[in-house]
Image (spheres, helix red, strand yellow):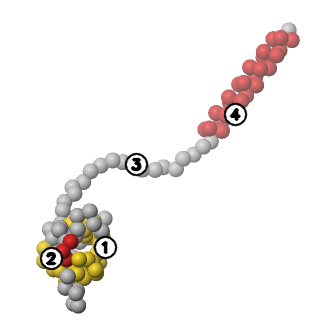
């Protein structure tokens, strides 16, 4: 009889722990959230009216480059030397951007790579 009581007690403890843990888990609340996946069109800009400004005292260096993107952008950078530095640009007027390149040797320029985003 004592052995049955021990078994009954162990079963009672296991059931009590199970019920308590279920009640605790059921009390948790998680706020509603959103998640998603999608796609959208990514189109390029049309770069026009490119203008290079040489240094006034040393024309072998470039002070800046400006261009019109033809559409609104929030961040623009250019690279004028392949695998070289990137230069940040500032919005001049409308969709015209200007990038300070002071000290860049004109002889090293081999491209005009423009990266722009509008988000």
Q: Nearer the viewer, mark 2 or mark 3?
A: 2
**The quadrant where residue 90 appears:** bottom left
Q: Position of residue 5 (x, y in %)?
A: 83, 15
Measured Cα–Cα span from mark 2 to mark 1: 16 Å
Q: Earlier along the polypeptide chain: callout 2 or callout 3?
A: 3
Residue receiving disc 4: 20
Q: Position of residue 50 (x, y in %)?
A: 15, 76
Q: Position of residue 78 (x, y in %)?
A: 25, 70
Residue receiving disc 3: 35
Residue receiving disc 1: 88
Is the C-beta separation of discs 1 and 3 under 8 Å?
no
Measured Cα–Cα span from mark 4 to mark 3: 33 Å
Q: Secondary structure at mark 1?
A: strand
Q: Earlier along the polypeptide chain: callout 4 or callout 3?
A: 4
Is the C-beta separation of discs 1 and 4 under 8 Å?
no
Measured Cα–Cα span from mark 2 to mark 4: 72 Å
Q: Which residue extends farthest bottom?
A: 57
Residue in the picture at 22% in, 80% down: 62
In this rendering, the answer to whether 12 lies above or below 108 is: above
> How many labels, in total?
4
Residue in the picture at 76% in, 25% down: 13
| Residue 94 appears in the picture as rendered | no
Q: Foreground residue, 105 or 95?
A: 105
Give neighbour class at mark 3: few <14, some 14-19, many 20+ (Cα, 10 Å).
Answer: few
Residue in the picture at 23% in, 68% down: 81
Q: Earlier along the polypeptide chain: callout 2 or callout 4?
A: 4
Q: Earlier along the polypeptide chain: callout 2 or callout 1?
A: 2
Residue in the picture at 27% in, 66% down: 84
Q: Secondary structure at mark 3?
A: loop
Residue receiving disc 2: 50
Q: Secondary structure at mark 4?
A: helix
Q: Earlier along the polypeptide chain: callout 1 or callout 4?
A: 4
């Amino acid at each position: 009889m004592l052995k049955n009581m021990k078994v009954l007690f162990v079963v009672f403890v296991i059931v009590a722990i199970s019920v308590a843990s279920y009640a605790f888990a059921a009390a948790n609340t998680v706020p509603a959230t959103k998640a998603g996946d999608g796609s959208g069109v990514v189109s390029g800009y049309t770069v026009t009216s490119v203008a290079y400004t040489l240094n006034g005292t040393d024309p072998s260096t470039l002070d800046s480059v400006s261009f019109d993107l033809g559409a609104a952008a929030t961040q623009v950078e250019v690279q004028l030397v392949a695998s070289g530095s990137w230069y940040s640009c500032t919005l001049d007027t409308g969709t015209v951007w200007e990038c300070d390149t002071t000290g860049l040797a004109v002889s090293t320029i081999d491209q005009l790579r423009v990266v722009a985003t509008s988000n």
